[in-house]
Amino acid sequence: MAEKKVSSENKIVATAGIYDVLVRPIISEKSAKMSESNGVVFEIAMSATKADVVRAMQAIYGIKPTKVNIVVVKGKVKTFRGRSRGTQRDVKKAYVSLPADATLDLSVEAQSK
């Protein structure tokens, strides 16, 4: 991922590749419980690393995460009308812990899209 740094403020500038790291926020019961303790959950690109997620959070939201955990959820095998079988896609999730003073409300953004 290409990134540009401004030397005077040492701030990471958002580039086109940064926006490809965070695919979408995941809104679920587990993520709602995490938001009570300053945590958010994102679906991320399969090639993204923890460092990529930290850079993307800094560039897009201006918040430096305290901790990032990554999980790959394998797609389930499904049967369609009892005949053909297929699999759902694999998903890579990032569980991001934010500092105590930071607030990030993603429920409004997800509902508007």
Image (spheres, grey):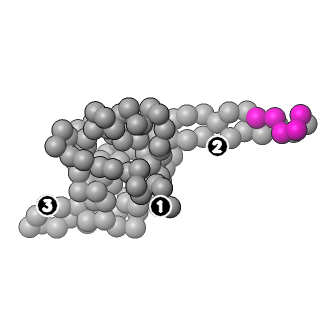
Nearer to us in this view, 52 or 34: 34
Q: Is residue 76 visible?
A: yes
Q: Is residue 62 magenta?
A: no
Residue at 68%, 33% (x, y): give it. 76
Q: Are marks 2 and 3 in contact (CB under 8 Å)?
A: no
Q: Quadrant of the N terminus?
A: bottom left
Query: Badge 2 is on which residue?
Result: 89
Query: Badge 1 is on which residue?
Result: 112
Q: Is residue 7 above or below residue 21?
A: below
Mark 1: which amino acid?
Answer: Ser
Q: Residues within 10 Å of mark 3 (few under 14, many from 20)?
A: few
Residue at 48%, 56% (x, y): give it. 111
| Residue 96 rendering spot, x and y as whole percentages | 33, 39
Nearer to us in this view, 2 or 110: 110
The residue segment tinted magenta is 78-82
Q: Earlier in the sequence, mark 1 or mark 2?
A: 2
Distance, label 1 to label 2, CA atoms, is: 25 Å
Query: Badge 3 is on which residue?
Result: 10
Q: Secondary structure at mark 3?
A: loop
